[in-house]
Image (cartoon, rainbow, N blue to C red):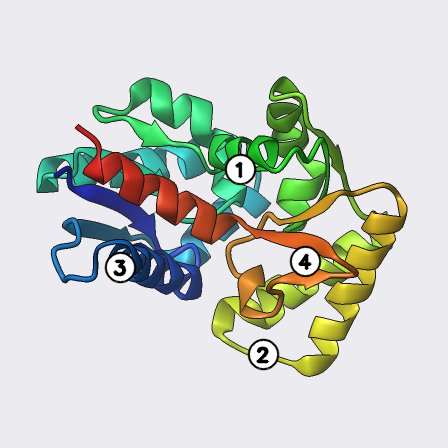
């Protein structure tokens, strides 16, 4: 059984989701407590966000890379970054990592293709929705990404950073997100990807018979399956 390494702290709330998702999925599958070892390296969320906002992108990427290297030294066989936005640096980190890195976008695409979803609405941070890295990666998998209008991107971003990353849950914010999701469905979305690992704190299940795809859970389960593989 392989040891899972998690780059956490991006935010603490999503890190907790990864830990509990992995263990809960294992228990449901096997009915015992022999789940894989999990090593978490929690970085400074505030420092990482500041580097990105100041366009010090190489420093931000190296911050994540050093965390992955530390996980390797601690005994992790592979690693994953427990957030969507930092995947803007995925290719750079993966190419310099001493251990394999598991992509949240690839894991999402794999799940979408199993469900025959070829057009997916994206909800996430402003960095994720305007940076194009997410859209382009999905496109390589043959999946078209539909993003919200600019004003809706700002709304989602504010809810994530001013509320969800600090554990604040508001019913009014849930209603706002649901309405934005409905707009994406009207544009042709066959599924809604929660491309921010905090969004499952508010959105679950389906809306208007269209499924929400919890990227944190999908990524966590992929990590579990890799840990259990020969």
Mark number, residue 111: 1
Q: Nearer the viewer, mark 2 or mark 1?
A: 1
- Name above or below for residue 192 compared with residue 104: below
Q: Picture coordinates of residue 4 (x, y %)? A: 22, 43
Q: Quadrant of residue 59?
A: top left
Say whether marks 2 and 4 touch (CB < 8 Å): no
Q: Which residue is mark 4?
A: 157
Q: Nearer the viewer, mark 3 or mark 2?
A: 3
Instruction: Determine if residue 62 is in view.
Output: yes
Query: Nearer the N terminus, badge 2 or badge 1?
Result: 1
In which quadrant of the rendered image does the N terminus lie?
top left
Say whether marks 3 and 2 touch (CB < 8 Å): no
Query: Nearer the N terminus, badge 4 or badge 3?
Result: 3
Which secondary structure lies at badge 3?
helix
Which secondary structure lies at badge 1?
helix
Distance of label 3 from label 1 (alpha carbons): 20 Å
Q: Residue furthest right?
A: 186
Q: Which residue is mark 2?
A: 169
Using a 10 Å C-alpha cutoff, classify the residue at mark 3 as few (fewer than 14 neighbours), some (14 to 19) or many (20 or more): many
Q: Quadrant of residue 164?
A: bottom right
Using a 10 Å C-alpha cutoff, classify the residue at mark 1 as few (fewer than 14 neighbours), some (14 to 19) or many (20 or more): some
Say whether marks 1 and 4 touch (CB < 8 Å): no
Nearer the observer, 103 or 152: 103
Distance of label 2 from label 1 (alpha carbons): 28 Å
């Amino acid at each position: 059984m392989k040891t899972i390494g998690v780059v956490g702290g991006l935010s603490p709330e999503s890190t907790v989701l990864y830990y509990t998702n992995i263990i809960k999925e294992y228990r449901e599958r096997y009915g015992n407590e022999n789940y894989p070892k999990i090593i978490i390296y929690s970085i400074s969320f505030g420092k990482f966000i500041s580097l990105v906002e100041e366009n010090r992108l190489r420093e931000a990427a190296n911050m994540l890379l050093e965390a992955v290297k530390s996980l390797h030294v601690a005994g992790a066989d592979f690693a994953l970054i427990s957030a969507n936005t930092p995947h803007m640096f995925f290719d750079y980190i993966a190419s310099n990592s001493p251990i394999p890195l598991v992509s949240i976008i690839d894991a999402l695409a794999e799940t979408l293709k199993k469900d025959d979803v070829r057009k997916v609405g994206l909800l996430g941070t402003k960095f994720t929705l305007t940076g194009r890295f997410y859209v382009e990666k999905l496109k390589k998998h043959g999946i078209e990404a539909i993003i919200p209008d600019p004003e809706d991107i700002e709304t989602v971003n504010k809810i994530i950073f001013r509320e969800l990353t600090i554990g604040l849950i508001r019913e009014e914010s849930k209603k706002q997100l649901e309405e934005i999701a409905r707009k994406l469905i009207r544009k042709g979305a066959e599924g809604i990807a929660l491309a921010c690992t905090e969004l499952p704190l508010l959105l679950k299940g389906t809306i208007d018979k269209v499924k929400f795809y919890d990227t944190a859970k999908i990524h966590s389960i992929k990590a579990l399956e890799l840990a259990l593989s020969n």
